[in-house]
Image (cartoon, helix red, strand yellow):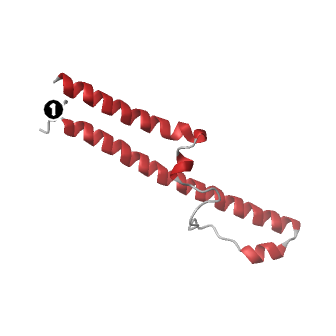
């Protein structure tokens, strides 16, 4: 039915595109995760304030479980994504993209 020749440049471009889109998708998931962690900390602070009887703090801030916060407490920028602490997140994508580019160059020069 559908057959792709394995050494076509289009195949390598598609692989790199899929890797890049997967990376962007995972960045969005990480940002949502940061927002949820931020909100859970805020809820925990409010519950602690209720437990100790500091109702003014709870009334001032209020309760909310939505993650519509623009950014989490820590700025989630590209600089933060590519920091040394997050190498386990970005290294596999960088490695896969570089490997695909090198493999494409070698295969296309050989054919």
Q: Quadrant of residue 106?
A: top left
Q: Is residue 39 left or right of residue 96?
A: right
Quarter of image, res 37: bottom right
Query: At x 42% / y 33%, what residue is drawn?
Result: 95
Provide residue 97's location: percent of width, then percent of height: 37, 36
Give the residue at the far top of this rendering.
Answer: 110
Q: Secondary structure at mark 1?
A: loop
Q: Which quarter of the image is occupied by the C terminus?
A: top left
How crowded pointer 1 is (Cα within 10 Å; few <14, some 14-19, many 20+) is rated as: few
In the current view of this chain or complex, which residue is farthest to the left? 1
Instruction: Kindly identify which residue carries mark 1.
Output: 5
Give x and y (percent) for residue 33.
Answer: 57, 54
Q: Which of the 4 image quadrants contains residue 49?
A: bottom right
Q: Quadrant for the N terminus, please.
A: top left
| In front of the other: 2 or 99 | 99
Look at 81% across and 63% down and name the residue there.
Answer: 48
Q: Viewed as shown, does residue 67 lie left or right of 58?
A: left
Image location of residue 20, percent across then percent down: 37, 45
- What residue lies at 53% left-to-right and 44% top-to-bottom? 82
**Residue drawn where x is 54% and y is 57% of the image:** 32
For the image shown, how many numbered marks are present on the structure? 1
In this picture, is 6 found above or below 64? above
Q: Position of residue 59 (x, y in %)?
A: 76, 77
Q: Nearer the viewer, residue 61 or 105?
A: 105
Front in this rendered view, residue 92 or 108: 108
């Amino acid at each position: 039915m559908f057959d792709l020749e394995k050494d076509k440049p289009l195949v390598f471009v598609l692989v790199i595109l899929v890797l890049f889109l997967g990376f962007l998708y995972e960045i969005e998931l990480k940002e949502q995760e940061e927002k949820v962690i931020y909100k859970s900390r805020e809820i925990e602070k409010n519950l602690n304030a209720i437990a100790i009887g500091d109702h003014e703090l709870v009334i001032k801030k209020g309760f909310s479980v939505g993650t519509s916060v623009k950014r989490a407490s820590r700025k989630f920028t590209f600089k933060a994504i590519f920091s040394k602490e997050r190498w386990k997140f970005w290294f596999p994508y960088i490695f896969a993209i570089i490997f695909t580019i090198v493999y494409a160059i070698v295969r296309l020069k050989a054919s």
